[in-house]
Image (spheres, coloured by chain):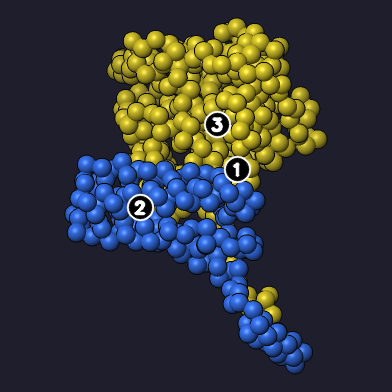
Amino acid sequence: MKHARISHCILLASVCLMTGTAFAAEPEDIIKYRQNVMKSQAAHLAATAAIIQGKVDYKNQLGDHVKALQATTKDIPSLFPKGSDFGETKALDAVWSKSADFQKLAKDTQQKADALAKVVAAGDSKNYGARFKDVADSCKACHKDYRKEEK
Amino acid sequence: MHFVLLAGLLFAAPLAVAAGVSSSDPPVKQGEYVYRAAGCYGCHTDEKHAGKPLAGGHALATPFGTFYTPNITPDPETGIGRWSEQDFIRALREGLSPAGDNYYPSFPYPSYTKLTDQDLHALWAYLKTQPPVKQANRKHELKWFARARSFVGSWKSLYFTPGVYKPDATKSATWNRGAYLAEAAAHCGECHTPRTALGGIQSGMHYAGTREGPDDSVVPNITPDKKTGIGRWRARELAEYLETGLTPDGDSAGDLMAEVIDNGLKYLRKEDLAAIAEYVLSLSPVEHTVRKAKKPVKKEEFE
C-alpha cells in the first residue's frame, strides 16, 4: 500500500517532468544503447576485415558495412551525455573530465570511417587495407585512454 | 639421451639470437627490438601526464600499494647513467639494484631473468643511446606490510627463480621462439596470471586471468579455454590482435593492453607475433571466469 502510494507520487512527478522539460532517458538505458551502438560498430568492423582480408567472399556487401560504420561513428560524443557515467559502464571519468581530447579522438574516428567509405565507394581496393587500419587504430586510441577494462 | 642432447643443441642455436633482430644487426638495433618486445617504454614513461620517454613516474596501482616506475634514461644523477652493464644485467636477471637492494617484483624481473645475455647486452646498448632526462624518482606509496625490505627478500625466496629461458627440445623452433618472447620479453604472465595473497604467481593458473590486475583492471583469461579463455581464437587472429589490437569480434584493445600493443608489440615482426600466438594457444586451457556476471537490474531499486 505504502509502495503503491510512493509509486503514484513518482509517476506523477515523472509526468510533470516529462511534460515540463525535455525528455530525459534513464542513464542505464543510455549506457545500454551506447554499448549496443558500439557493438554494432565492432561487428561491422569485423565483417569489413573479413572481406578485405579475403577470408570471405562478400565483396558486394563491403559497401554496406563501411556505410554502417560511417553512419554510426558520425557523432560518438552524443552517446556520452553528462550523467551517463554511473552504472554498468566501462567509460572512464576522463570521457567527461577531458572532454575536449575525447571529442578530438571521436572526430578522428569519424574522419577515418569517412576515408574508408570513400575508398570503398571508389573501388580503390589497393587502399582498403591502409584505410581500414586507420579506423581500427582510431578505435584503439580512444579505448586506450577512455575505456577501463571491465571492473 | 644423445638425441635429446642433439635436439637441445639444434634448438639452442637459433635461440642464441633470441629476441634480437638478427645476429648481424648492430647491438643498438637488436636492443631496440628487445626494448619493444619487453615493453620498457610503457611502464617507464608517464604518458598520462605527458612525461618524457623512459623518465619514469608512471603510477602502477596494485594490492600492495602504488609503485612509481623509475627513470631509466642515461641521466647520471636521476637515471641509470652511472650504471655499468654488469649493474644493468644484475638488475634484470637477479632483481638487485647496483647497491644490492632487492627490487619489488612490480619490476617484472621474474620474466626478464629469462632474457639471454645477448639480448640484455643489446638492450643495454640501446638504452644508453636514449636522451637523458633529469627527473628524480618518486617514492613508492606502499601499504605497511609491503614496506619492509625483508618482505621482498622472502618473496624472492618463495617465488623467484633466476635463470635464462631454457628451450623445450620436444617443441618446434617457432614454439620456443614464441615461448621466449612471451615469457622472457613480453612478460604476459605478469598481468595475465593470477597471484596469491603474497603476490606470487598462482601455480596451475598460468595465463588464466585475474580480477586484480594493475590499476584495478580485469585482466582476461588468455588460455585456450573455449568458454572462459580465447580457445575460439585462431592463431592467425591472435597474431593480428597483437599487431592491431582488433579482436576477431571487431572489438579493440583498450586500457593497458592498447598501451602494450601501441608501444611494443606492433613493432614486432609478423613471424614473431605468429610464434607468440602459436605458444599461447598451445597452453593448457584453464576454465576461469574473470569477468563479473551481469547483475539483473531490479526494478524496485529505482522506485
Residue for badge 1 = B213
Q: Are marks 3 and 2 in contact (CB under 8 Å)?
A: no
Q: In the figure, is residue A7 to the left or right of A131?
A: right
Q: Which chain is yellow?
A: B
Q: Position of residue A66 (x, y in %)?
A: 31, 56
Q: Position of residue B291 (x, y in %)?
A: 54, 55
Q: Amino acid at mark 2?
A: Asp
For label 3, the crowd category at 10 Å Cα-Cα, with few meaning under 14, some 14 to 19 and many 20 or more, is: many
| Quadrant containing the N terminus of chain A in the rendered view | bottom right
- Residue B157: name its quadrant: top right
Chain on which label 3 sits: B
As drawn, A109 above or below A87: above
Do marks 1 and 3 share a subunit? yes
Q: CA distance from mark 3 to mark 2?
A: 31 Å
Which residue is more in the foreground, B240 or B220? B240
Image mark for residue B42: 3
Numbered disc in front, either 1 or 3: 3
- Let me know if residue B202 appears in the view: yes
Q: Colour of chain A?
A: blue
Amino acid at pointer 3: Gly
The residue identified by callout 2 is A114
Which residue is rendered at x = 40% and y = 50% of the image? Answer: A111
N-terminal-most mark, 1 or 3:
3
- Judged from the image, the secondary structure of the residue bearing numbered disc 2 is helix
**Secondary structure of residue under mark 3:** helix
Q: Nearer the viewer, residue B157 or B89?
A: B89
